[in-house]
Image (tube, rainbow, N blue to C red):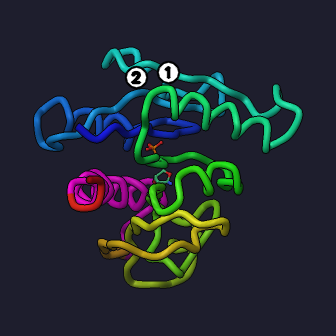
Amino acid sequence: MVKIAIFASGSGSNFENIVEHVEQGKLKDITITALYVDKANAYAIHRAEKHHIPVHINEPKDFESKVHYEHKLVDLLQQEQVEWIILAGYMRLIGDTLLNAYEGKILNIHPSLLPKYKGIDAIGQAFNSGDKFTGSTVHYVDSGMDTGEIIAQQQCDISTDDTIETLEDKVKQLEYNLYPNVIAKIVK
Ligand code: GRF
């Protein structure tokens, strides 16, 4: 069994989708040790409770520095013998402490066809761009914002009758297939 931890900051629908894939035997040989959140009010916590997944809540503001915050996370991850970190809506750059401890073993999903539309509001950026399509990208994490090596992408149309909300929904639907597929291939 490969042990993974999932990091989230908000809704956690990708987190829950991965949990359901594990529960349904669609992600074999993977165990989720815990959900790690950096916000005490992240809705993802409720989803974790529903599925009986342990939750670690650590808010960076409660630590002396980012290095101290990430040292705490590395301690917890090592106690749980986590081998891979899966970012799913974790709204924070990963610092050297975590990157050094988990070199080449951190994945992220981003709601655009990178290298287009890095950073926040990627769907809004794509919607307002006049582009005819957008999508989602899974990539390795490095010290930059959505700059790590791309592993896989999936695309969808932006049609003239789309709103931001319908486009968000389309991209999420792509993500619910894309991320588990990549995890199944890469996380070993
Ligand atoms: C996803 O669209 C993901 O690409 C991005 O943040 C969003 C998280 O959504 N990194 P959710 O919290 O999984 O619903």
- Indicate left or right for 72 with 29 as reference: right
Residue at (60, 61) in percent of width and height: 121
Residue under numbered circle 1: 55
User: Which range is magenta?
Assistant: 160-184
The answer to whether mark 1 and mark 2 are in CB contact below 8 A is yes
Q: Is residue 165 above or below residue 62?
A: below
How far across and how far down the image is residue 24, in percent?
Answer: 12, 33
Q: Is residue 165 above or below residue 79?
A: below
Residue at (34, 15) in percent of width and height: 52
Residue at (40, 22) in percent of width and height: 48
In which quarter of the view is residue 10 placed?
A: top right
Q: Secondary structure at mark 2?
A: helix
Q: Amino acid at mark 1?
A: Val
- Indicate left or right for 47 with 51 as reference: right
Residue under numbered circle 2: 48
Q: Amino acid at mark 2?
A: Ala
How far across and how far down the image is residue 31, in percent?
Answer: 28, 33
